Image (cartoon, grey):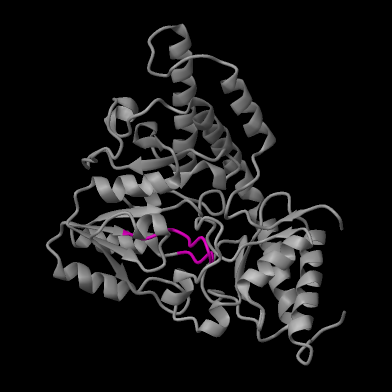
Amino acid sequence: MTRAIYFDHNATTPVAATVADAIAGALALTGNASSVHTAGRRARQMVEEAREKVAELVGASPAQIVFTGSGTEANNLVLSGTASRHILASAVEHDSVLAAADNIEQMPVDGDGVIDVAALAARLSDLDGQALVSVMLANNETGVIEPVAEIARIAKEHGALVHTDAVQALGKINVDWTDLGVDFMSLSAHKIGGPQGVGALVINEEIPLQSLIKGGGQERSRRAGTENVPGIVGFGAAAKLAATNLDEIEEIKTLRDHLESGIRTIAPDTVVFGESVDRLPNTTCLSMPNVSSETQVMKFDLTGIMVSAGSACSSGKVQASHVLKAMDVVEEFASTAIRISLGHGNTMDEVEHFVSQWRKMYAQANPNKLKGAA
């Protein structure tokens, strides 16, 4: 196999052909979506059509969709814009949540990375109700799915607001605004075959939200700045495509499971993080005994296989995972963990090739422990 193998879909997905065509069509047109002339109205129409598609994907109304420049911005908008005196977030949240405000209190998780719901409820009972709970729907490193609907129910009993970062979950599992029962939900286009540089925050319109970026009345005064019309159009096209692609996700899960079982045949002592709880069907985070995460990423890249050592939001640096640390993973396993995240277009041949390369690397570092046939 000579072509490159892309196993880093949680970092960003390839832009789908239909999405690229939609973006190209928007780029060919002139018009500011805030202008009242013909060109401006056409741009506005394209933005609103995209808003409808994103809303439909998550079961919300178009008026609830606030377009942003990224999922990170969406997270910052809600954590900075609700004026909550207390913010409770799980210890495994994305850095764009944990670093978004100064008054964030981290809630513990168990060994699988699932938030301690009892500890959250106990802490909420100590507060005066002016709290915001932020728990991601699915973890970007391990794929572990959090019990957001249950968390929302408990938070509401204590008068707290609820936000979920659904960036990684969108397009991989069904994401339904009503079923989750949250007040705010962050989304991103480039995780579902859309362009980079555009995200969205789904809002409860009854809750005041202060703008993070000021200076214009765009997005109903919730996000100032000229709209990125081509990016938003691409988000809409990707949202429409993602609704269809959900039917194929079971095939991706089959690939993921085959990959894990193949590695376990070679090295039974490999740790798959979060494997005993619900995970995204495309994601596995696992260790390779005696081979550092950074070494694995570089060596796989030299063979044409692209994986990661956790989040891709650290300026290209491979560093200790705060997610695995919060799960109390010992250094021996945390320092040898990589993330493989599959997506549409990946094949069983690619998985088999990855397992073969994993075996070679493992054998070099563990010559006396190799299991399985060559």
Task: Determine the image quadrant of residue 90.
Answer: bottom left
Toward the left, the furthest residue is: 128
Locate residue 108, reporting x and y percent: 34, 74
141 falls in the magenta region: yes
Locate residue 41, reporting x and y percent: 43, 13
Q: Nearer the viewer, residue 313 or 191?
A: 313
| Residue ID at (36%, 28%) | 225
Q: Nearer the viewer, residue 331 or 280?
A: 331
Q: Main secondary structure of the magenta part?
A: loop
Locate residue 104, reporting x and y percent: 27, 62
Answer with left or right where residue 37 lies relative to residue 20: left
Toward the top, the furthest residue is: 37
Residue bounds of the magenta highlight: 134-145
56 falls in the magenta region: no
| Residue ID at (21%, 71%) | 123
Task: Determine the image quadrant of residue 74.
Answer: top left
